[in-house]
Image (spheres, rainbow, N blue to C red):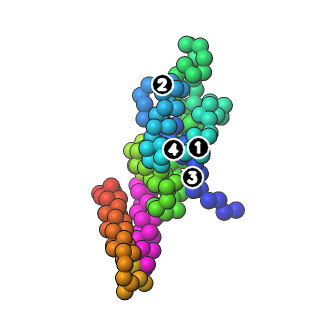
Amino acid sequence: MYSDRTLLPKECLRLCALGTLALSDKPISYADLANSVRHFMSHIMGPSLDMMGSSLQLLKLEGLVKEDTANGSFSDAQLSLTTAGHEKFVELMQGNLRDTSGELSRLIMALKMRFLHLLDDDVRAEQIEILQDVCELDLDRVLALREEHSNEAGNFTGWLEMEVKRLEQKRDWLKSLLA
């Protein structure tokens, strides 16, 4: 059975939360984690109810985070990643990216770049190669469109040229990550 492993908005939220915990060398309070996730997500995509609709408390119920409630309530609890949480983080980091142009794809790319260094070397290299391939496909599409519309007047060809340069720069930067 075919399984599309492209990340959905709620999985991006989970990846951001789990990655934030993985980055930290100490537990993080629920409130600080929620604020950190909200801050990152809203600065990449702008405010979005789709991104904030999923509760971080589910991470605890699923055994992905553990809490120390020495201070009392869940909102005061100090959260840290469990082994299952780390495994889920690695799984989410390997989620697919269909293209690099849409808002959700931009968020996935930003999350991957933020947390890529937390992956093992071989998984990290594989992810960079996948991102390069996606970028190359985007570039090929834009180059074909530029070729098809090269004789048209107006601003479209200028915009396409700008997109080509942006994608070439992204491709070259991704190649440099493997060097």
Q: Is residue 90 visible?
A: no
Q: Which mark is residue 47?
A: 4
In the image shown, does 76 or 25 lie closer to the viewer? Answer: 76
Which of label 3 and label 1 is nearer to you? 1
The mark nearer the N terminus, 3 or 1, is 3
- Label 4 is placed on what type of residue? Pro
Residue wearing tag 2 = 27
Q: Which mark is residue 7?
A: 3
> Residue 64: within the magenta?
no
What predominant SS class does the magenta segment belong to?
helix
Q: Is residue 177 visible?
A: yes
Q: Which residue is depicted at the point 43% across and 31% down?
A: 24
Q: Secondary structure at mark 3?
A: loop
Q: Are marks 3 and 1 in contact (CB under 8 Å)?
A: no
Which span of residues is magenta-colored?
Answer: 125-145
Which of label 1 and label 2 is nearer to you? 1
Residue 12 versus residue 62 in the image, above or below: below
Residue 80 versus residue 179 in the image, above or below: above
- Image quadrant holding the C terminus, namely bottom left
Residue wearing tag 1 = 49
> How far across and how far down the image is residue 166, in percent?
34, 64
Q: CA distance from mark 1 to mark 2?
A: 27 Å
- Label 2 is placed on what type of residue? Pro
Q: Secondary structure at mark 2?
A: loop
> Residue 134: within the magenta?
yes
